[in-house]
Image (cartoon, helix red, strand yellow):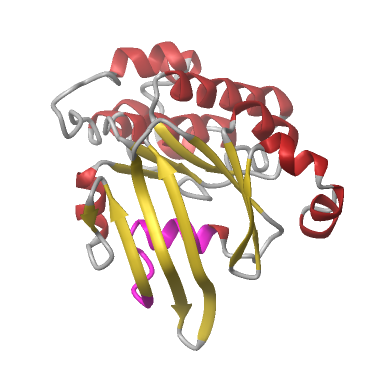
Amino acid sequence: MTALLETRELHAFYGPFHVLHGIDLTVRAGETVAVMGRNGMGKTTLFRSLMGLVPQRRGHITFAGRDVTSAAPELIAQAGVAFVPEGRGVFASLTVLENLTMAARPSRDGRNRWTLERIFDLFPRLAERRKNRGNQLSGGEQQMLTIGRALMTNPDLILIDEATEGLAPMVAQSIWTTIETIRAERVTTIVVDKDFRALSRIADRVCLMSKGKLVFDGPPAQLAAERALLERHLGI
């Protein structure tokens, strides 16, 4: 597999606060990579930096062979990166159907694998609620909608921040099943969540973050065997 995304010596700042400290990360095309760590360790800042949403950063970000270090968020999205943010960010005044159709576009190579019909097959609940506005949906339905909206852009890479945070167990299981489907389609995925067991089932690799640095990058089984690392950085 060839590298789709690479970061080299990536640093990020919020004003005087130095949040990311030299992240070196390579994600190959078709991989599913889990990013884990306690709260405040830099996971969301990493995603926001990859999307160009953190203006104070230095280092290098390469996507699909292009240097996107200084690219604007809309250009990174157009290049084929989709972002499912923590907090979901649905358009409250738009219906489910409008939220989805406004994002629809083919992939960079012209393919249209993720259509409205396919999203409704993936999330039957959204099909039932297609005329409801975003602010009329439950948290789980909003998460389905945000993932569906990201897929409607037919991305090469999808970033999913806090995939199942605050969701009921049955809804969370639906989200994990969806991520498994995305993986089967060979859509490159980086996902943040706290459920190590669930992530271990779907991820090719786990990247563990602590204080803005990567302290582990390897297969889930290897991390599971490192009990001291699990306890120190995840509390499990």
The residue positioned 47% from the left and 55% from the top of the image is: 25
The image shows residue 55 at horizontal and vertical percentages of 34, 73
Task: Say if 133 sits above or below 129 in the image.
Answer: below
Q: Is residue 52 visible?
A: no
> Does residue 11 appear left or right of residue 33 in this picture?
left
Foreground pick, 38 / 173: 38
Q: Is residue 218 left or right of residue 33?
A: right
Task: Classify residue 24 as left or right of residue 67.
Answer: right
Task: Work out whether 118 lies above or below 187.
Answer: above
Q: Per the image, is 54 magenta?
A: yes
Residue 20 place in picture, x, y as percent: 52, 71
Residue at the spot x=47%, y=18% of the render? Answer: 123
Horizontal and vertical percent position of residue 61: 33, 60
Residue under the image location 37 percent in, 28 percent down: 96
Question: Where is 100 relative to 126, above or below?
Answer: below
Quarter of the image where the N terminus is located: top left
- At 45% from the left edge and 73% from the top edge, which residue is drawn? 11
Q: Which residues are magenta?
A: 44-57
Q: Is residue 227 above or below residue 203?
A: below
Q: Which residue, as the protein is rendered here, is positioned at the far bottom?
A: 16
Depth order, front residue of 153/87? 153
Q: Position of residue 152 (x, y in %)?
A: 29, 29
